[in-house]
Amino acid sequence: LVIAQFFGVLPVAGVWPSCRPERVRFRWISLSLLAALILFVFSIVDCALSSKVVFDHGLKIYTISLSFSVICIFCFGVFLLLSRRWPYIIRRTAECEQIFLEPEYDCSYGRGYSSRLRLWGVCMLVAALCEHSTYVGSALYNNHLAIVECKLDANFWQNYFQRERQQLFLIMHFTAWWIPFIEWTTLSMTFVWNFVDIFLILICRGMQMRFQKGNYADELYFWFCLSYVIIRVLNIMFAASSIPQEAKEISYTLYEIPTEFWCVELRRLNEIFLSDHFALSGKGYFLLTRRLIFAVAATLMVYELVLINQMAGSEV
């Protein structure tokens, strides 16, 4: 919120981290409100000029700034309306926070609430800064290529700003004095475009962390119990199905000896391997082997796919 004051977003006073919620104020006469109004009016003018460019040249890749301007108008307008009620909202939020600071709600997850929320905000702001930096770098490089390859006799910065903000130069001529203002408005519009998502994410993350409050006991029991049962059943099934596999390994070793050298015990052992089944049986109806396990798994999978196909589009 401190950074947002420079870009005319949510113009309120007393938003420093060390300030108490009671000191948060909305002032009609302040530099932040003046900046917000200037940027709001500028966004409307920029939208009108972008609309003229679209009407003249059609909807092209270089005319998509119209949608960007429309989004910025709504974002600046929403934060201007929100800033009037922000002192009341932040005080009510502080009152609710006092409840969660009681000993009954104390837990390790709740103690790191502020640091986790700040970490989320810093990471998203850094990601937005990296995204904007790569965009500016790409635009500067493309501007350099356009001047070199097209052999343009134009000033580098003049050509850059006329390429990036061509709609503004429909009503004004390029001079070096306009560069700080154009850069400030461009950064402010880019900031509010990212800030509206970051603001909502932080609000939702804060509510999620407060409601969560480290209550993992039921969830931990459920997933541990489910994992234990699945692992136990699989272990039993594969342990039982490994019996016939090991019996086959013995018979393979037996066949490495030529039959003419077999003694009576080896011949009897061979007859046992050929006539008997070394596997757990379900009352003689089936033998628990790996082939049976994979066949049952494949049948269940096919049944589920058919069931999903038959229920597609129906209300459950």
Image (spheres, grey):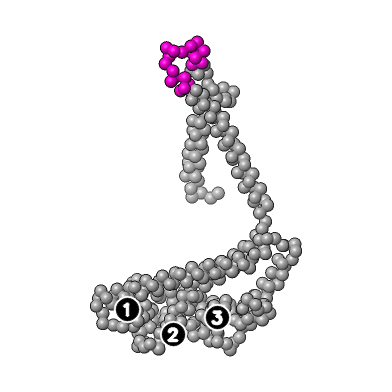
- Amino acid carrying label 3: it is Gln
Where residue 219 sits in the image (x, y, percent)?
Answer: 64, 51
Q: Is residue 313 above or below residue 117?
A: above
Residue 162 seen: no
Give yes or no for contact between labels 3 and 2 (Cβ–Cβ under 8 Å). no
**Taking 114 as reference, is 45 above or below it?**
below
Residue drawn 46% across the image and 13% down it: 262
Label 1 Cα crowd, 10 Å radius (few <14 / some 14-19 / many 20+):
few
Above-or-below relation of 78 to 260? below
Placement of the N terminus among the 4 image quadrants? bottom right
Asked if 197 appears above or below 245 in the picture, the reply is: below
Q: Nearer the viewer, mark 1 or mark 3?
A: 3
Residue 27, picture quadrant: bottom right
Mark 1 → mark 3, Cα distance in angstroms: 36 Å
- Closer to the camera: disc 1 or disc 2? 2
Q: Amino acid at mark 2?
A: Phe
Which of disc 2 and disc 1 is earlier in sequence?
1
Q: Secondary structure at mark 1?
A: helix
SS of the residue under disc 3: helix
Q: Main secondary structure of the magenta part?
A: helix
Instruction: List the single residue furthest toward the right.
Output: 103
Which residue is the site of mark 1? 56
Element under disc 2: helix
Q: Amino acid at mark 1?
A: Asp
User: Residue 79: horizontal and vertical position, in percent?
Assistant: 55, 77
Left or right side of 108 for 312:
left
Tell me, for residue 5, which label it has, or none. Answer: 3
Report the Cα–Cα distance between label 1 and label 2: 26 Å
Instruction: Tell whether 246 sits left or right of 141.
Output: right
Give the residue number, with chain letter if any, for mark 2. Answer: 181
Q: Earlier in the sequence, mark 3 or mark 2?
A: 3
- Tell me which residue sits at (67%, 76%) in the image: 91
